[in-house]
Amino acid sequence: MARLPLEPNDSKALILASQFDCLEEMLIVVSMLSVESIFYVPRDKLEESRTVIKSFSSPEGDHLTLVNVYHASIEFLEKNKTENGNEKAEKNLMKWCKDNFINNRSLKHARDIYNQILENVERMGLKISSCGDDMLPLRRCLAASYFLNAALKHPDGTYRVLANGQIAEIHPTSVLRRSKPECIIFYNLVQTTRNYVHNVTRIDYLWLAELAPQCYALKDN
C-alpha cells in the first residue's frame, strides 16, 4: 500500500478490486472521488441540470454514476481525437462538459489522477481487469473495502452507521436520496446541522457478514 499515494482505505479498495476483477472501475471511482465535485448545478438552470445529470445516474448509487460519467467522457474524447485531433478534441470536451453540467477542471484532474494511479498499480503487478456492464463485482468490492462505512435504514428514512451507531441522512445530491435502499456503503460523512453521508451505493446487508466477518455477524441490527 505504501506505493499508492492514497488514503489507506482507497489503497485497500484498489488491491481488493484486482481480486474482484473490477480494478479498472475502482480506479475510476477512486480518481473521481479525489477531486472536487464532478457535477455543478446552476441555480438558474436547476431543473435542466437535474434532467441532464439524471442521464448518467445509476440506480445502484453514486459510485457507479461516477463510472458512467467517466466512461461517457472518455468515449466522447477518444471519438473526437480520431476525427479532429487532440487539441480540438479537448476543446470539444470542455463544451461537452458545460452542456452536461460537469466540472471540466475536476474531470481533467480525475483523468490525471487515474493515469498516475494506473502507473503505480501496473508497477505493483496488480491484475487490471474490468467487470464490464455487470457492476455487481464493483458493489461487492466497495462493501469489502469500506465496510466500516456501512449503514442500515431506519423506518423514518434515516440511517444508522453500523460501526459506531451515528445517525445520518443521505445527502440531497445523491442519486439514492429518494429510493433510500435498506443498506448502503458511503464514502464520507459530513457533519453540519445534520449528519449527511455522501457518495452512496446500494449493497446487500448479507454481504457484510461474508466480506467482513471480523466486524459483522448474521444478526439483527
Image (tube, rainbow, N blue to C red):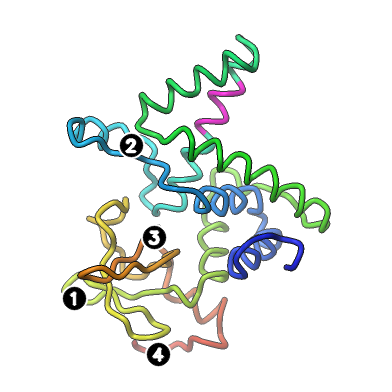
Q: Which callout, 4 or 2, points at the residue further toward the start of the chain?
A: 2
Which numbered circle lies on residue 155?
Answer: 1
| Three-letter residue code for mark 1 | Pro
Give the label, 4 or 3, closer to the camera. Answer: 3
Q: Which callout, 3 or 1, points at the residue further toward the start of the chain?
A: 1
* Residue topped by disc 4: 219
The residue lying at 31 percent from left, 53 percent from top is 174
Q: Which callout, 2 or 1, points at the residue further toward the start of the chain?
A: 2
The relative height of residue 20 versus residue 85 in the rendered view (above or below) is below
Measured in 3D between alpha carbons, the distance from the residue under mark 4 to the one under mark 1, in whole angstroms, is 18 Å
Out of 90 and 79, give the one closest to the viewer: 90
Instruction: Locate the N terminus and report the quarter of the image it occupies.
Output: bottom right
* Residue topped by disc 3: 200
Image label count: 4
Out of 131 and 95, give the one closest to the viewer: 95
Image coords of residue 129 (percent x, y): 70, 49
Measured in 3D between alpha carbons, the distance from the residue under mark 2 to the one under mark 1, in whole angstroms, is 29 Å
Which numbered circle lies on residue 53?
Answer: 2
| Three-letter residue code for mark 2 | Ile
Give the label, 2 or 1, closer to the camera. Answer: 2
Measured in 3D between alpha carbons, the distance from the residue under mark 3 to the one under mark 2, in whole angstroms, is 16 Å
